[in-house]
Amino acid sequence: MTDKKKGIVTSVLFLAFSIVMIIFAKDIKPMMENDLGSGFFPMVIGIAMCGLSVLRLVVALREKEKEAKKSGDDLMGGLGTLILIGAYCLAFNTVGFIISTIVYLFLQILLLTPKEKRNWLVICLISVIAPFAFYALFVYAINTPLPKGWFGF
Amino acid sequence: MSQITQAIQMVLFNPFCLLLILIGVVIGIIFGSIPGLSSTMALILFLPMSFGMDPMNGISLLIGLYLGGMSGGLISAILLKIPGTPSSIATVFDGGPMADKGEAGKAIGVGILTSFVGGLISILALMFISPYLAKVTLAFTSAEYFSIALFALTIISSLSGTSIINGILSGFLGIALSLVGIAPIDGAIRFTFGESKLYGGFNSVVILIGIYAVTDIIRAGFERRDIDKKMAKKSYKMDSLYGISLGDYLKRWVNIIRSALIGLGIGILPGIGGSTASLLAYTAAKNGSKHPETFGTGEVDGLIASETSNNAVIGGSLIPLITMGIPGNVATAVFLGGLTIHGISPGPLVFTKSGEYIYGIFIALIVANIFMLVTERAGLRTFVRLLDIPKYYLLPIVLVCCVIGAYCNKFTSFDVHCVFIFGVIGVLFKFLKIPATPLIIGFILGSMTETNFRQALMQTGGSWSIFVTRPISLIFLLVAVFSVAMTIRKQIVNTKKGKVAAEEEES
């Protein structure tokens, strides 16, 4: 994507956000005498953001379109990591800390490690030992409970 | 005099007490360095343990935890570019680039040394001039608080990189996020969309972890082909004990003293905190520097400003606590709990009623500060070795730490989900070339700005002149205007330079 298009996307996203903010802030009425009310500040920020987004749009539209550099991003690695972290965050409380962390660490390390450097033994050891070590440290040493999940651990 | 002798006996001649301070400092450093865990959490966890001890021993343990936790944040801020605590955000700006240049050892060394100096200056202020300083707090009303927050917000414009508009938009989004939940003053419920979990608003630690850590790890996924190149080993050699010669360090005395005073001042004022102190000190150092353009590229002065000021907050925050019994932040509120359990009630009479314990606290603070200087330096080699662990092993483990940190905030899965959402926002920001740091700064300062703005106007019945008729407030506002004007001027000069360069290229 060219810088110009990125600028347009940025301004549209912020403009939409600020309009939603202004609409909701409009309905917050002052409840106390002498107070500006809880709607005033969001309204100011909303309007300022709205104005600035328009300015950003103007700047972006006036920019010359340059040829976009070809992105060297590894989509598989990036989106894979995104999905893994998302799934881990969702499973953290329901499945439990130990199991979800073992699975997450194993898959994430596998995904990030270049093929020629994959050492299965090290990957397995890290993904099993790290969760138990964290669990022992938090639950037993500093008395902070971590989610037990389905299987009671 | 007998009280001081008693205090020395209770702390310095008591090996168990010294050991407790050491344990406290080490555990505090660990809590501070893991993103998501903080010195406040360490204090809360160890508070019950301190009840069963002798008063001085229990209090000394808490002091070690508080001091260690405040200083530990610099380690992950420099090595991983993930601030261990909100107060070390500004440490990332220059500490991170220093580590990239292969100066991780020097950055941590300077950070430790200057944390020690900042802490020491504030402890000495606490010991000798605290009753006078405590009166300063009375001169600060909502108007001054608002102006300080506004001044701190101006740092956004100078941190925005090439696109100042993108930076300010990001800052506004941060402020907007701080407005979610139950509003200050009248308790109106805003932007929760019927979701009760949003009533308490977002947590700054959660946003911090999401934007810094999760984003970094997802980006590492996108760049996994280069993951090996990025971890090419660099030398971490240091040419002196703390990576900087004494002469070179002392040459920066203006910055050191200014940052320590900012930290001390912000520490004394209740409810502001270390993150604002380090941002303010960083802005002041950048504005006052002869070469502001080097800030953000690994400038030692930036690192010194941030770390000196956030540790100077420690002594500062204890001043209103000891002299008036007012805790300025959550950590000192927990500390106050620890004191009252042992029958020490801080206030104007504390020196006559329990003077030996107060002198004991002063001595324990100095001892803890020295322990911090020594233990962190001793561990420096081990910390830096963290960078030798291949990133494909290190980053996933860091993510697990972050998720635990987010969960331990309130023990809800909601915060864990938020970490992911903010991580995705961070990735989107990187893609669109929007700087993410202004978002965090806007979030941290947003509610402080709004609350004090409304309170100040309520006091005057709606007259806005209060902000310019009160001298301290006026000074901060003028400095804020000056700071913004300087940035705009710089931006115009840079744009002109860029245009000339582009025209020359075309011709």
Image (cartoon, coloured by chain):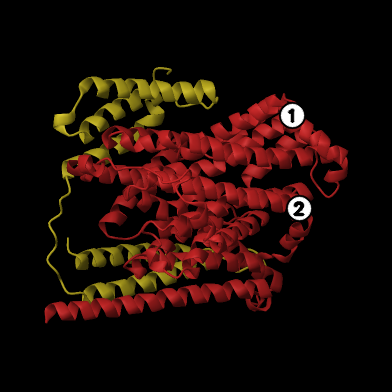
Chain colours: A yellow, B red
Instruction: Give the label on residue B128, or none.
Output: 2
Q: Which residue is mark 1?
A: B13
In depth, the one of B104 and A124 nearer the eye is: B104
Let me know if residue B204 appears in the view.
Answer: no
Q: Residue B80 at what x, y percent from top left?
A: 37, 43
Residue B167 sits in quarter: bottom left
Above-or-below relation of B366 to B445: above
Quadrant of residue B210 within the rendered picture: top left
A105 or A150, which lies in front? Answer: A105
Q: Position of residue B250 (x, y in %)?
A: 54, 57
Query: Relative to B281, is A9 on the left or the right?
Result: left
Q: Is residue B94 left or right of residue B428?
A: right
Note whether residue B298 is visible.
Answer: yes
Residue at x 30% of width, y 29% of height = A105
**From what the image shows, is residue B364 above or below residue B292?**
above
- SS state under label 1: loop
Q: Nearer the viewer, residue B288 or B499?
A: B288
Please state which amino acid type lies under the numbered disc 1.
Answer: Phe
- Indicate the position of residue B63 as horizontal and vertical percent values: 65, 38
Q: Nearer the viewer, residue B345 or B366?
A: B366
Q: Earlier in the sequence, mark 2 or mark 1?
A: 1
Q: CA distance from mark 2 to mark 1?
A: 23 Å
Which chain hosts label 2? B
Q: Residue at x 79, y 55 (%)?
A: B131
Q: Mark 2: which secondary structure?
A: helix
The chain holding disc 1 is B
> Which quadrant would the N terminus of chain A be assigned to in this image?
bottom left
Q: Amino acid at mark 2?
A: Phe
Please provide percent x and percent y for residue A57.
Answer: 28, 72
Q: Quadrant of residue B358?
A: top right
